[in-house]
Amino acid sequence: MYEHVKNVAVSLLGLKNYKDVPPMMGAEDYFYSKIVPTAFYYRGVRIVDIIQLYE
């Protein structure tokens, strides 16, 4: 599952826009990943991108 999600992300966004990050506890407790194959991804912009809008 991981490889499939990574391949789709890279094909859509390009390798330079793909980054592996360590798992972290946010609003999700990862309970479901113990039962079914799971992939989490982030969407959004970086703080640097937001700052550039106002320069």
Image (cartoon, grey):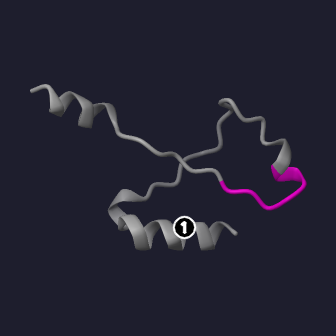
Residue drawn 37% across the image and 64% down it: 13
Residue 35 within the segment the image draws in magenta: yes
Under mark 1, the amino acid is Lys
Q: Is residue 37 left or right of residue 15?
A: right
Q: Callout 1 environment at 10 Å: few (<14), some (14 to 19), or many (20+)?
A: some
Q: Is residue 18 above or below residue 23?
A: below
Residue drawn 65% across the image and 66% down it: 2
Q: Is residue 33 left or right of residue 28?
A: right
Residue drawn 31% across the image and 31% down it: 47
Q: Pick the residue in front: 25 or 41.
A: 41
Q: How many marks are shown on the rendered structure?
A: 1
**What percent of the width, then of the height, locates residue 9?**
48, 65
Residue 43 within the segment the image draws in magenta: no
**Secondary structure predominantly adopted by residues drawn in magenta:** loop
Specify the quadrant of the image occupied by residue 3: bottom right
From the image, tell me which residue sits under label 1.
Answer: 6
Tag 1 secondary structure:
helix
**What percent of the width, then of the height, locates residue 40?**
63, 50
Specify the quadrant of the image occupied by residue 37: bottom right
**What percent of the width, then of the height, locates residue 6?**
54, 67
Q: Which residues are magenta?
A: 33-39
Q: Is residue 5 above or below residue 29?
A: below
Q: Is residue 47 left or right of residue 39?
A: left
